[in-house]
Amino acid sequence: MVITVTDWLVDESKWFFVSLVVASVLTTLVLAHQRRRGLGPDLLVPWALNLFYGCTIGTMAFGHILAVTIKLFQGTLDASPVMTVLLYGIGFALAIPAGSLVASTWRFPKDEPRAQHQGMVFNLWLGATLLVLGLHNFVLAVPALFNIAYRFHTRRAVGWGIVTVAGVAYAGLLVGSLIFLASGQSFEQFSGME
């Protein structure tokens, strides 16, 4: 069977992996550029954590909105008008704070206190939204807690611990997304909910 671009775009098992790759590439490229500017770890670490998380969830939200739109225009969206609005609402409820979190990273270091405050607000928004959408999103909400915890740490060892745990968690998510991608199953089938 030949898989078309449209089939690929509406397949939710693809977007999780793509979002992590996009976030990794973008964060790495921009981090390399920012390091050449001479910014220290106290600015770069929260900036990179927020950029990575915002890109990850933002790309997934974009994929969700795009898939709903494609299915709607194809006539294959199996949802009532109310459910269709709800599906778009879910996408935008994640896309807006994720995009805002990414945008807040561009203020570093020009307006650091404001950017850090906004980063905390958008992390809370994303984490809470994901949890409201279901406890199965807990794994995607946890990085918001890492980002917030990093903002309030006072000891260098604690900061490094948070970054290490976040890095291991993201590596685990990447491996999990590869397994999910290879399975070809829907999220519900993969997680045993269906």
Image (cartoon, rainbow, N blue to C red):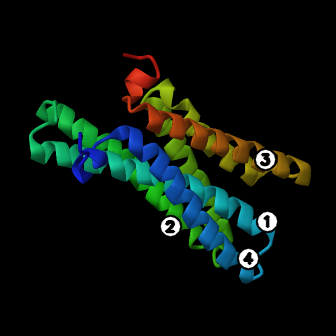
- Frontmost of labels 3 and 1 is 3
Q: Assign the N terminus to one quadrant of the image.
A: top left
Distance from label 1 to label 2 (Cα)? Answer: 19 Å
Q: Residues within 10 Å of mark 2 (few under 14, many from 20)?
A: some
Residue 141 lies, in percent from the top left, at: 56, 38
Residue occupying the point 20% across, 32% down:
83
Residue 101 vs residue 66, the one in the foreground: 66
Residue occupying the point 67% across, 40% down:
169
What residue is shown with label 1?
Answer: 42
Residue 84 lies, in percent from the top left, at: 19, 37
What residue is shown with label 4?
Answer: 35
Q: Residues within 10 Å of mark 3 (few under 14, many from 20)?
A: few
What residue is shown with label 2?
Answer: 103
Tag 3 secondary structure: helix
**In the rendered view, would you say 95 is above or below 88?**
below
Q: Which kind of residue does numbered mark 3 sit on?
A: Thr
Q: Which kind of residue does numbered mark 4 sit on?
A: Arg
Distance from label 3 to label 1 (Cα)? Answer: 15 Å
Tag 2 secondary structure: helix
